[in-house]
Structure formats: C-alpha cells, structure tokens
Image: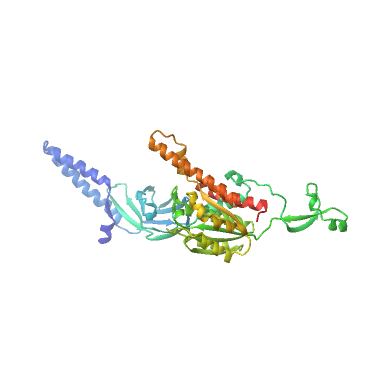
Amino acid sequence: MIKFIKGFFVHERLFYCLGSIGVCYIVSYFFNSFFGVANVLLLLLVVFVFIDALVLFRESGKINAVRALPEKFSNSDANELIIRVENKYPFKVNIAIIDEIPVQFQKRDFSKTLFIPAKSSKDFSYYLRPTERGEYIFGHLNLYVSSKIALIRRRYRFENDQMVKVYPSFIQMKRYAFLALDNRLTLHGMKKLRRIGHTMEFEQIKDYVIGDDARTINWKATAKRASLMVNQFQDEKAQPVYAIIDASRVMKMPFNGLSLLDYAINSTLAFSNIALKKKDKVGMVTFANTIINQLPASSKKTHLQTILEVLYSVNTKFLDSDFGALYTQVKRKITQRSLLLLYTNFEHISALERQLPYLKALSRKHVLVVIFFQNTELENLIHKKAHTLPEVYHKTIAEKSYYDKKVMVATLEKYGIQTILTKPDDLTVNTINKYLEIKARGLL
C-alpha cells in the first residue's frame, strides 16, 4: 500500500475533468437538469480513474530505464549521456522523464517526454557541459508513466546516486592530437614553421638525392662508397619540458564559466600529449604560496595518465603566489636545461615587477615562457563607444590596463624571456604554437 501511494501521481488531465464537472455543478444551480449530468460525469470519472490505476499498478516492473554514464566527464566540453527506456506494458505509454542532474549544473528544469509503443524500447541522449573538476552525483532517474486514459501517472525511480568524475578536458586533448597526426593543425590556428638549420642528433648515412643539403655530405663515407653520401639528422628527442601552473588567487578569475586555472589545466593536458608524441619528456609543477605538486619529466607511455590524475586534483589556493619558492624548487629539482611553460596572470605591471627578479633567474638556465591572459571584458569595453562621463572614465581605465599588458610583454622580452599574451579561449593553440616554434628554432 505504501508503495502504491508513493508511486501514485495525478495527471493534469484529471484536474481539467474535475474543473469541467465543477462548472456543471455551478450551472446546475441555475438549471436543474445539469445536476444529473454532473453526477453522471463524476461517476464516469471515478470509474476511469479506477480503470487507469488498475491498468498501471496491477503489475510491477513494467517499465525499466538505464542512465548510461561515461566513465568520466571532460571539463568544459559537451558530454553525452544516454537514457534507455523499455516499455513492457501491452499498450503504448506516455512517459515524462525527470533526471536529477548534479547540483553543480544548477539545472532544475530538465524534462523529456517519450511515447513508447507496446513491448518496445527507446533511447534518447542529452548533453552536459561541466565547468568544474571533481565528483558529480546524479540523483534519481524519475519516470512518470501514463496510459491512453491519462488521468493518473505511475512513478518509477531508477539509478540513484550515480557518481562520475570530471577530469581536465581530454576531449580537447584528443582533438589536437588527432589534428597533429593528420597535419590539419593550420585549420585551428596552428602555425606551419620552417626549421632553421638542423639539429645535431644523428640518425643515419644515406645516398645523396637531388635536394639534399650539400653541407651534410659525409666525405669519408663518400670516398669509401665512391658515391655521394649524406648525414641524415632527426629532431632532438627526450628534451625535458615542464608545465608550471600558478594556482594562486590570480588564477581564480572566471571567463565563460571556467577559471583561468582550468584553462591552464586543459592547455597543459593537450600540450603534454603533443610533447609526448614528439618523444619529449614532460613534467609538471603547481605552486601557490608553497609548492603543491611536482611531477618529474618522463616520456613513458603511461605518463600522460599520471599527468591527468595530478591535474584532476589541482585547486585554486586563495593566497598570493611565492615565486621565490618556485625558483628554489626549480633550482634544486630541475638540473637539466629545460623548457618551462609558466601559466600565471599579471593584471598590473607592479605585480610583474615584484616577480621579475625570479623570472630573470629562471631564464638564465632554462628556456622560460611566461603565459598570461588578456582581459577580454576590458577589450570589449575599449571598443565600445562612451556616451557619458562615467563611461569615458571606465574606458580610459580599460585602455590603461590594456597598455600595461603590452608593456609587460616588452619588459619580459627585453630580458630574453619568451611570452604568450593570449585570450583564454586561444590558450591551447598559442601554447602548442610556441612549443613548436621553440623546437623548430632549436632554442632548447
């Protein structure tokens, strides 16, 4: 009986019928003939409600549903969920589906209606775009089933407390990796770079063919074979590359629902995948007021999964970053000349000036690339016409901030520090471009 009460719900059609019968009773106050009509209608309504309840509740397990969740969600991407519903009733049913989506999405209006024929099943899918990493808990999958009479509904509940973890954007990582292998990176803004000279990592001696660089002729091998032979070189491999992520309060600033920290994490994962495919060793450091994580550089096949797990647990610290601690850690732990990609943000030139001595010290031994962000909201304000005095004041401040960013770039480049000033949405493309440029120029 308790199970029947919990599963019993009224269809909106029943309220319409009761409202119509109520109108008949009101009219019967003026016309007595309507009183009998109203009584008959009320009796018929009770009979049909009883029949409808008997049809829907006489047997259990007539509806089955499964929410098929992926093993993990990709942060900032559209993730597909599939719901499969099976109707075991011997008649067509109308099913209203309400899925209890995790609280992180703040979505309370999810609803889907399906018409499923007798003894058949139907699938449908929908997409969710998470903007935070972590564990997401799905509640009940609620199905409200009604027959053709549609006066009441029976509720079925499935799949309570399913959990899925949201990881850094592995969808973005796979997309860029595929484009790199398919040589179509230029379609997404990747630069096609010409190699300057060649590296000194010897691969083999081969026969000369027209077009080979005459400077690579191996005269000793040529004398032995009595035909021109040339040295063939390959890109240097196993070079150490480190992604250094600032997890302090400056990286909490949001853009399009994601924090700057999450943009940096997604970029690190995609870039690390490209670097590992090029046989380089990839490591990672995260820091705020102290060193949070350090992952030594490695080129193992399983290293990307290790990077993914470490990035999953990185969170913003609401404290100022300590570049002195970063410099000390790098000096102690990274002894080989490496490429350091430093993800951080400077909103004022004084913030850069405080950290500049440490950045200069890092760049003396390593190839340092400082990556920080353009404030796209300020750029929109700059291009907007000002009509009032406060708007003129706001636009002037925005232009000053925009100018400061350009001064920061010039200041860093003056000391031989590579820079990337980028919009958050273009971060991954620009980072991979800079990595390919440094490899092509042989700076590492």
The reply to whether residue 130 is in sight is no
**Which sits in the foreground, 334 or 280?**
334
Q: Quadrant of the N terminus?
A: bottom left
Rendered image coloring scheme: rainbow
In the picture, measured across the screen, residue 79 lies left or right of residue 9, that is right
Q: Quadrant of the C terminus?
A: bottom right
Q: How many marks?
A: 0
Instruction: Name the residue rendered at 21%, 44% in the picture.
Output: 18
Residue 231, percent from left and from top = 78, 55
In the picture, measured across the screen, residue 374 lies left or right of residue 112, that is right
Residue 188, percent from left and from top = 57, 45
State whether residue 323 is above or below residue 372: below
Q: Quadrant of residue 66?
A: bottom left
Residue 151, percent from left and from top = 27, 48
The reply to whether residue 428 is in sight is yes
**Which sits in the foreground, 96 or 4?**
96
State whether residue 105 is above or below residue 289: above
Residue 422, percent from left and from top = 53, 47
In the picture, measured across the screen, residue 127 lies left or right of residue 240, that is left
Instruction: Name the residue rendered at 79%, 53% in the picture.
Output: 216
Of all residues, the one furthest to the bottom in this rendering is 332
**Which sits in the foreground, 374 or 145?**
374
Instruction: Name the residue rendered at 84%, 58% in the picture.
Output: 221
